[in-house]
Amino acid sequence: MTGEQSYGPYVTVADEFEVSNAGRTATVRKLETRKGERVEIESPSGDETLRVDALGLESLAWQERAVISQYLPEGDEMESLETESDEVACDAEFELMNEYAHVRLRRLRSPEVSVLQIHAPKKRERIQIDASGLGGLARQTHAIFTGFLEQPHGPEDHH
């Protein structure tokens, strides 16, 4: 994790951590901008980044793993961790919020792998995304969240 540092004229990196698996490492940063808090996801290659606000992340939290898996390279599968295991621990986290949404981002780590867990407490939804999945998301445009927000209040049983 880092302390606050400059990241351009109107952007500050407030926090960051890395998520790693299978020799890939993606970076997740909490940014403070003039327009509010954002998360920046940097792909393992470092070539692609995606910035998203709390509402976009909340809409991601209620997606099925198969939705994220479609953005992986052919043959890749996303890893997840059993959160009840004694070998799994949260060793980094931060929150992101705005007037519409609140999410908690946590790095869950086992001895072999780490994943990003996005938790939307108000919706009681969460998803785990590994470095490969984060790389797949970083290659997308913001249009991906338009599709996710077609159900703006989460899965049907939450209405």
Image (cartoon, helix red, strand yellow):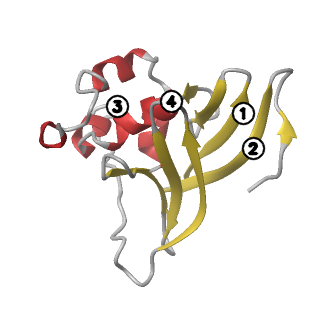
The residue beneath circle 1 is 32
The residue beneath circle 4 is 138
Q: Residue at x 34, y 31 (%)?
A: 71
Sequence-wise, the earlier of marks 2 and 3 is 2
Sequence-wise, the earlier of marks 1 and 3 is 1
Q: Is residue 140 above or below residue 96?
A: above
On the rendered structure, is 23 left or right of 101? right
Q: Residues within 10 Å of mark 3 (few under 14, many from 20)?
A: some
Instruction: Measuring from the top left, give residue 106's x and y in whole percent.
Output: 52, 57
- The quadrant the C terminus occupies is top left
Residue in the foreground of this view, choosing between 140 and 1 = 1
The residue beneath circle 3 is 71
Sequence-wise, the earlier of marks 2 and 4 is 2
Q: Residues within 10 Å of mark 2 (few under 14, many from 20)?
A: some
The residue beneath circle 2 is 14
Query: How far apart are the alpha carbons under marks 4 and 3?
Result: 10 Å
* Amino acid type of the residue tagged 4 in the rendering: Ala
Q: Residues within 10 Å of mark 1 (few under 14, many from 20)?
A: some
Q: Residues within 10 Å of mark 4 (few under 14, many from 20)?
A: many
Asked whether residue 72 appears in the rendered view, the answer is no
Dots 1, 4 in contact, CB < 8 A: no
Residue 110 got which mark? none
SS for dot 1: strand
* Amino acid type of the residue tagged 3 in the rendering: Tyr
SS for dot 2: strand
Instruction: Measuring from the top left, give residue 144's x and y in whole percent.
Output: 37, 21
Dots 1, 3 in contact, CB < 8 A: no
Mark in front: 1 vs 3: 1
Query: How far apart are the alpha carbons under marks 1 and 2?
Result: 7 Å
Query: How far apart are the alpha carbons under marks 2 and 4?
Result: 20 Å
* Amino acid type of the residue tagged 2 in the rendering: Ala
